[in-house]
Image (cartoon, helix red, strand yellow):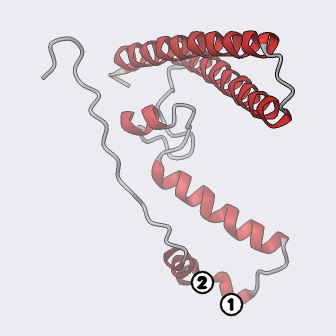
Amino acid sequence: MPERQDFIKILMEKREECERTLKRLHEIKREYMEKMDESSTNDESDLAQREISLANVYSMIERKNHEIREIDLLIQRLEKDQDFGICEECGAEIPVERLLLMPGTTLCVDCQAEYERLGKIQKLKTEGMWTKDYEELEWMEEVEEDLGLRETTISVDVGQGEGAS
């Protein structure tokens, strides 16, 4: 993966952004706690709303902490694993755009689609809804089309480092 160092740099920037957000969330949590301590209101609905808001802040803090841990693990993996960015199934290079959107992915788009297709078949078999009539691939394609499952291409401008235009 020739863009390995650029990718690490992007992940570090994303990590710093998460840390800034996390810091702000802790400030908001502290403000809520102070307001709840200072509050002498007996209005149950007001108190309930504040508790709900505080619970939401706690949830966001947990998500940001998890995101930072995931980024740290990914950076470690990038630095140690020479096969990072290579599809575990077919050996093809996973596009940088896909890795930026789904940093933990280990499969290319085609292999992921096949994995999901097989998962759908397995689910139907497990639920007892699979019959021999469904063995034909055309049926699955029709179902995917009926469900509106379409492959989408997303492009992300990774840039070429400093001075890129």
Image quarter of residue 117: bottom right
Q: How many marks?
A: 2
Along the line of sight, the residue nearer the viewer: 44 or 71: 44
Q: In which quarter of the image is the C terminus?
A: top left
Residue 126, given in percent of the width and then of the height, sits at 84, 70
Along the line of sight, the residue nearer the viewer: 151 or 133: 151
Furthest-bottom residue in view? 133
Q: Name the residue under label 2.
A: 136
Would residue 2 be seen by someone viewing this image from the given angle? Answer: yes
Residue 37, given in percent of the width and then of the height, sits at 81, 11
Label 2: few (<14), some (14–19) or many (≥20) C-alpha neighbours in 10 Å: few
- Residue at 56 percent across and 60 percent down: it is 114
Residue type (three-letter) at the residue carrying disc 1: Asp
SS for tag 2? loop
Q: In which quarter of the image is the N terminus?
A: top left
Q: Mark 1 points at which residue?
A: 133
Residue type (three-letter) at the residue carrying disc 2: Glu
Position of 7 with respect to 116 (left or right) is left
- Residue at 56 percent across and 45 percent down: it is 89
Would residue 95 be seen by someone viewing this image from the given angle? Answer: no
**Quick check: marks 2 and 1 in contact, CB under 8 Å?**
yes
Relative to 154, residue 21 above or below: above
Residue 63, given in percent of the width and then of the height, sits at 66, 27
- Residue at 57 percent across and 32 percent down: it is 104
Along the line of sight, the residue nearer the viewer: 57 or 90: 57
Position of 15 with respect to 55 (left or right) is left
Relative to 40, residue 122 above or below: below
